Image: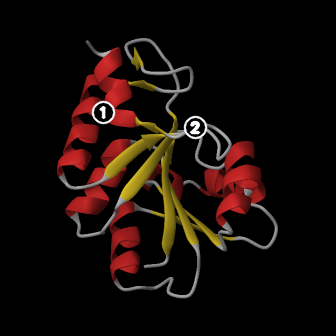
Amino acid sequence: MAIIHTRIDDRLIHGQVASMWTNQLGATRIMVVDDKAAFDDMVKTSLKLATPYGVALSVLPIEKAASRIIANAYEGQRVFMIVRAPNTLLRLVELGVKIKEVNVGNLTHTEGRIKISNQVSVTDEEVKDFYKLKAAGVEVSLQLTPNNQREDFMKVVEQATK
């Protein structure tokens, strides 16, 4: 499988992703899977500008991404997949995409969200989605940058929602 790392980050591509994660992983392609971004030319242009030089970019809606991944369209490439929210990843799994692990990087705190860490806040619905991902065999970790300690996201959620 060409996907070397999967991340949930509501900022999609930004400084940490572009400079730290992409370099650390040796990614040759960033794949943003997001229905909204895939159909918004301004967002796609912004994502392209944020993508490091020499790294390819795909911005795809969920179903097209699933079909391309399943068809091994990126064989021989080192693909770093980024989604905005856990429901996107859950939909990919439901469509047959095999995902072993996902790293949660940033889910912005806004009113009505449960603060899990300094960088991650979730809704009740997202918590349910994370449990569904776990039940599907996806290991979920919390790690802002490659230099930060990796934590078991589900344990952090359980502690924060007691």
Q: Is residue 57 left or right of residue 92?
A: right
Vertical comparison of 96 with 50: above or below = below
Q: In the image, residue 59 lies at what x, y percent?
A: 54, 63
Residue 123 visible: no
Q: Nearer the viewer, residue 159 or 18?
A: 159
Vertical comparison of 61 with 119: above or below = below
Residue under label 2, please give it.
149
Q: In the image, residue 122 lies at what x, y percent?
A: 38, 25
Residue under label 1, please give it.
126
Q: Amino acid at mark 2?
A: Gln
Q: Is residue 58 left or right of residue 20?
A: left
**Residue neighbourhood size for the residue with mark 2, other residues' Cα within 10 Å, grouped as few (<14), some (14–19), many (≥20):** few
Q: Which quarter of the figure has residue 63? A: bottom left
Residue drawn where x is 71% and y is 44% of the image: 16
Q: Amino acid at mark 1?
A: Glu
Vertical comparison of 52 with 50: above or below = below
